[in-house]
């Protein structure tokens, strides 16, 4: 096992009426001026906004609203939020939404407390922000697990890069499955695939022999597959929804990564695809994964074979390791089709003239991947995905 340090700073309030039960106590601990940050308005249509604004009023807070945080949040939106936070002396940020709102606020919380350009500080000078506005998250869309970590995926439109910036951890996260019931089904599916992808990307890192983190990981993958199927059969199944909500959080709260160097090559490729096309994250991953995995098969066969048997229930009798590894990719591909996820970039509406060479040339090559991809090979993967 690798050496590790594990610390987990986020308090999670999970379950029915989690906001009503816990937000008053948390709000009592924070300052007067609260920024309520959200996306394009789903929370106004499904009643979550009314519930939260009422709890903020009862707590006597002065509320500044910051809305319109888009999917794949931009660095410009971060700056807009940071300016608003400074102008209104914000003491606390309540981020309400999916990964996009939750990520955007992580960086706003840091940018509002410094005049330094955070993109420059983190990606060029390799420094880290030190001051943060405290934050709480209310999750309305599951998948990313963003509420459980301090990484934010931000699109810098000027530089044409979608990449990580490090912000603060949330002090608490509210996960009420009822808040996710109005998610569009396409987002339920793409979010679930994103969660499955996080598990697979972690699993495919090293060490590559069986270990406790990977055995827990296999259980998470089985859980996501089973509960997405249950949700497809019955979208009103709140128990399946709540399992998906927690499984997604497990994927990104560090538990599965204990003692591991993770892979995340599919994510790095998808993020740059997003920088160029603003595509849906989970859908991009669904197209990329099987193609990338076929390229990784020679090196990844032992892990793929384990996934075939332990996650996808393939009978190993009479099969070679390579046959099992292929059976894993076949099972994954057929699940993608079963869930109605896209299998090509064209199905996602990505234009044929997209500059795939530029995407391959700017993708981060990960250290944990069992195959060291060249840029030419990543380009080949992208072209096969068209
Ligand atoms: O903006 P609104 O109107 O709220 O609508 C959103 C949005 O259109 C809608 N939605 C959310 N909750 C809803 C709802 N609609 C109805 N009812 C609800 N309860 O869903 C749409 C998608 O939301 P978004 O937050 O963009 O999706 P997701 O959670 O998939 O987040 C994607 C972003 O997270 C990044 C992705 O790259 C992408 O930028 N990621 C962040 C990670 C992290 N920090 O750990 C890890 C991931 O790998 C990922 O990269
Ligand atoms: Zn992801």
Image (tube, helix red, strand yellow):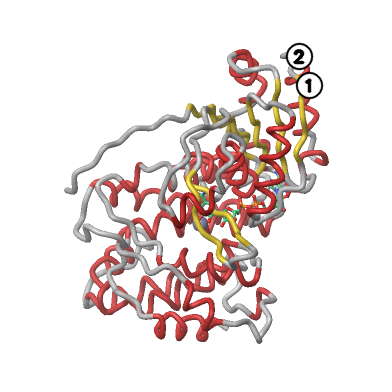
As drawn, the label of residue 287 is none
Q: Residues within 10 Å of mark 2 (few under 14, many from 20)?
A: few
Whether residue 345 sits left or right of residue 214 in the image: it is right
The residue sitting at 73% across, 37% down in the picture is: 84
| Residue at image location 53% in from the left, 40% down from the top | 147
Dividing the picture into quadrants, the one containing residue 133 is: top right
Residue 58, numbered circle: 2
**Residue 124 image point, x, y percent:** 45, 57
- Where residue 359 appears, as percent x and y from the top left, is 53, 76
120 to the left or right of 297: right
Query: Which residue is farthest left?
Result: 1
Determine whether the residue tagged by mark 2 lies in a helix, strand or loop. Answer: helix
Mark 1 touching mark 2, by CB under 8 A? Answer: yes
Query: At which x and y percent is residue 196?
Result: 46, 57
Q: Is residue 272 above or below residue 242?
A: below
Pick the front one: 125 or 35: 125
Task: Decide which of 66, 183 is in the foreground and name it.
Answer: 66
Q: Secondary structure at mark 1?
A: helix
The residue tagged 1 is: 54
Judged left or right of residue 374, residue 104 is right
Disc 1 residue lies near ligand 1 with CB under 8 A = no
Using residue 237 as the reference point, say whether residue 165 is left or right of it.
left
Check disc 1: other Cα within 10 Å, few if <14, some if 14-19, many if 20+. Answer: few
As displayed, is residue 192 above or below residue 271? above
Q: Quadrant of residue 41?
A: top right
């Amino acid at each position: 096992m690798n050496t590790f340090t594990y610390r987990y700073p986020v308090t999670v309030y999970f379950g029915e009426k989690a906001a009503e039960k816990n937000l008053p106590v948390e709000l009592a601990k924070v300052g007067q001026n609260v920024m309520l940050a959200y996306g394009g308005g789903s929370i106004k249509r499904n009643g979550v906004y009314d519930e939260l604004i009422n709890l903020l009023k009862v707590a006597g807070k002065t509320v500044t609203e910051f809305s319109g945080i888009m999917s794949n949040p931009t660095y410009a939106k971060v700056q807009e939020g940071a300016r608003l936070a400074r102008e209104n002396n914000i003491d606390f940020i309540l981020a309400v939404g999916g990964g996009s709102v939750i990520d955007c606020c992580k960086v706003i919380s840091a940018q509002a407390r410094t005049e330094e350009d955070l993109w420059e500080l983190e990606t060029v000078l390799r420094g880290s922000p030190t001051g943060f506005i405290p934050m709480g998250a209310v999750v309305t869309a599951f998948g990313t697990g963003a509420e459980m970590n301090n990484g934010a995926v931000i699109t810098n439109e000027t530089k044409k890069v979608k990449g990580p910036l490090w912000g603060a951890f949330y002090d608490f996260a509210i996960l009420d499955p009822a808040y996710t019931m109005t998610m569009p089904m396409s987002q339920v599916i793409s979010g679930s695939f994103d969660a499955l992808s996080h598990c697979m990307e972690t699993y495919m890192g090293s060490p590559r022999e069986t270990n406790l983190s990977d055995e827990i990981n296999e259980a998470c993958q089985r859980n996501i597959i089973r509960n997405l199927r249950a949700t497809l059969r019955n979208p009103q199944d709140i128990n399946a929804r709540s399992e998906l909500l927690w499984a997604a959080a497990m994927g990104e709260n560090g538990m599965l990564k204990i003692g591991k160097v993770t892979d995340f090559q599919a994510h790095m490729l998808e993020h740059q695809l997003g920088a160029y096309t603003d595509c849906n994250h989970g859908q991009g991953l669904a197209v990329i994964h099987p193609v990338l995995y076929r390229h990784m098969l020679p090196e990844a066969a032992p892990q793929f074979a384990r996934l075939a048997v332990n996650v996808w229930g393939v009978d190993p009798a009479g099969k070679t390791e390579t046959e099992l590894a292929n059976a894993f990719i076949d099972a994954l591909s057929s699940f993608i089709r079963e869930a109605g996820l896209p299998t090509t970039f064209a199905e996602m509406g990505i234009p044929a003239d997209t500059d795939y060479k530029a995407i391959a040339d700017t993708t981060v090559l990960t250290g944990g991947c069992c195959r060291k991809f060249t840029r030419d090979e990543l380009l080949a993967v992208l072209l096969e995905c068209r």
